Image: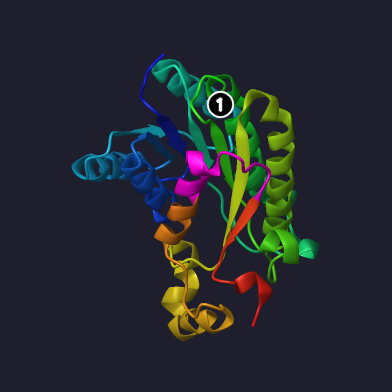
Amino acid sequence: MSQTKVAIVTGATAGIGLAVAKRLGKDGFTVVINGINHDEGAQRVKELVADGITAEYVGFDVTKEDPVTKNITAIGEKYGRIDVLVNNAGGLGGRSRFEDMTTEFYRFVMALNLDSVFFASRAAIPFLKKGDNPTIINYTSNAGWNAGGPGAGMYGTSKAAVHTITRALAKDLAEYGIRVNAVSPGTIDTDFHIGIKSTKPEVFKSWAKNIMLGRLGQPEDVAGVVSFLASKDAGFLTAETIQVGGGQALGI
């Protein structure tokens, strides 16, 4: 078995995922980043390597069962282990009210946020069993509690499912010493919000007024918490969800 600690971060060619990959790389992990834009993935690896991080890119669509299983298994077999799986990939998928919602839209949002966690986790488990302080880290959202804003109801529904599958995986894997936790990012300044940022920048800036700490989050804020959850300092934490939102969940 390789002595290299291996972390897989899905959806890591930009935003929070890239910040997480950088942080875990600095923590000493060999980082495998995933995405669907192969040119972007290759460029990110160059940047990570230039930063002194051992990294590689593996391209596959996290919503598709066979590519996820095949690629995660190949990574596990290559290194002989997986120590950390960060199920970072996910997203809003668009907005739709229920009356007008197509079945295709419903299935896509659920696939993007829930299927992706299931497929990747299932494939990684045999290799996490060989890891050191092995852990899975998922992403939920305030929308998982408050059901999201107008048109984001299916996003909220999928993230509520991620909250529960995190606890279910933690129960299922505790006997192997595999910990499973989640982070729940608040409003983080990334391209996730690029639409409103470019069309209504004043509205985007005003969001900080609803956050106790008075500012929007940065990708590094989430990366620091993921780094903690992946460390031995979090060795007695499992089935937890950590809000990373500057107190936003409580409102002010």
Label 1 Cα neighbours within 10 Å, binned few <14 / some 14-19 / many ≥20: many
Q: Which of the 4 image quadrants contains residue 80? A: top left
At which x and y percent is residue 97? 74, 66
Three-letter amino acid code at the position of disc 1: Ala
The residue stretch that appears in magenta: 226-240
Q: Residue at x 49, y 62 (%)?
A: 192
Judged left or right of residue 210, residue 231 is left
Asked if the stretch drawn in magenta spans residue 236, the answer is yes
Q: From where the camera sits, is residue 238 visible?
A: yes
Q: From where the camera sits, is residue 88 visible?
A: no
Give the vertical position of 194 relative to 50 (above or below). Answer: below
Front position in the image: 96 or 244: 244
At which x and y percent is residue 43? 26, 44
Residue underneath mark 1: 124
Q: Residue at x 44, y 23 (%)?
A: 75
Q: Which of the 4 image quadrants contains residue 224? A: bottom left
Q: What colouring does the structure picture have?
A: rainbow
Front position in the image: 218 or 94: 218
Which residue in the rendered view is the most extreme toward the top? 1
Front position in the image: 242 or 45: 242
Judged left or right of residue 156, residue 208 is left
Asked if the stretch drawn in magenta spans residue 218, the answer is no
Q: Residue at x 43, y 34 (%)?
A: 7
Which residue in the rendered view is the most extreme toward the left? 50
Q: Residue at x 78, y 62 (%)?
A: 98
At which x and y percent is residue 158? 70, 51
Front position in the image: 116 or 167: 167
Which residue in the rendered view is the most extreme toward the right? 99
At which x and y percent is residue 37? 38, 43
